[in-house]
Amino acid sequence: MTIERQSIDAALASVVDPHTGRDLVASKTIRHVTIDGANVQLEVVLGYPSKSVHGAMRERVEQALATVPGIGRVSVSVSQDIVAHAVQRGVKLLPNVKNIVAIASGKGGVGKSTTAVNIALALAAEGANVGVLDADIYGPSQPTMLGVDGRPESTDGQTMEPLVAHGVQVNSIGFLIEKDNPMVWRGPMVTSALDQLLRQTNWHDLDYLIVDMPPGTGDIQLTLAQKVPVTGAVIVTTPQDIALLDARKGLKMFEKVDIPILGIVENMSVHICSNCGHVEHIFGSGGGAAMCADYGTTLLGSLPLSIGIREQADSGRPTVVADPDGPVAAIYRDIARKIAVTIAEKSRDMSSKFPSIVVQNT
């Protein structure tokens, strides 16, 4: 008995990827289907970092195929294929960098750098090749957060090799200056320095480059948004009204330069007392969700005000590597997956990029 391809597709259409909300047939994630009589071999190729869910996905596909009448031996492999997505018009992609994600905030002190490094580590933990560019020239913090020191090496005198920490490539002005040396530079010098860090670093086959942007929405941030080929931006805020005011400005800045907003992360959303368990919304509540509703974007996740997050980042082992099985790391992983899935879906669905063609009698 030979199994028909239609039977295979019908069975696979019942398997919905919980992270995309689409079935495997509609999302075109089924590849290399081979039917040999009653035996079936195929590959599921997910478009986002997903190493931790490969086993569960394989089991679900095998269970679905087992319902096909007359099915014989089933061989299912699951892998991931992360592709480059288009950036703003007139800006070329970087060599060896598929997607650039800007992590930004309108105001400093909202946990943007901590969020950026944990997102990068979460993507790497799921099997992606990830880099971190510390774009905060005035206040570089990624060397401390990643617990890495030293100076980038150069083999040709013109480009730099990124340093590596916890499996993530990283470069920062903090590697090139003394720790207590202030950057007393004007805007054009800062922009030039960042452009060199971005383009003169030999990034090695990155699926994602996470850019820890400087806070604010001034000339420096706007210039960077216009020059850096950004796939999408994530806005980090706290629920506090004053932080949300500046976060809205940051969001509008990216909209002006045609950079998609991938979502909003709300930091310090709630504090849980470590002694008595009392829950208190120190900086207010619901601000991130209200901002998402106003601008039609996604609340990627809400993180607690926790001493552990601060201590782990200060120690050079951010939460995702210091406590990978903990509840806060799970939030960071969920945020990172949502970002990656959003990018993957955008890279597939390009229909909105094409103009409608109307034929009229003239």
Image (cartoon, grey):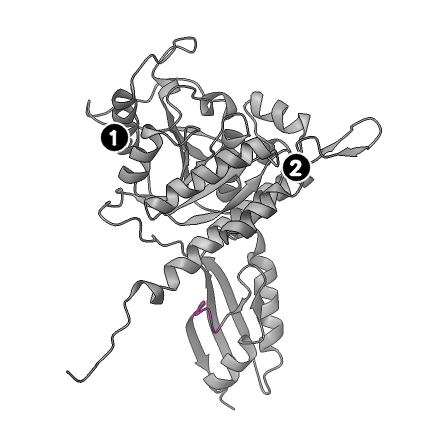
Which residue sits at x=29%, y=31%? 201
Seen in the picture, residue 130 relative to 341 is either above or below; the reply is above
Mark 1 or 2, closer to the camera: 2
| Residue closest to the eye, 87 or 249 | 249
| Residue type indicated by callout 2 | Ser
Taking the magenta stretch, the answer to whether it contains residue 27 is yes
- The magenta segment is 25-31
Secondary structure, magenta segment, majority class: loop
- Which class describes the residues within 10 Å of circle 2: few (<14), some (14-19), or many (20+)? many
| Residue type indicated by callout 1 | Gln
Q: How many marks?
A: 2
Residue bearing mark 2: 269
Q: Is residue 123 left or right of residue 327?
A: left
Which residue sits at x=36%, y=54%? 83
Which residue sits at x=52%, y=35%? 245
Q: Position of residue 284 (x, y in %)?
A: 67, 35
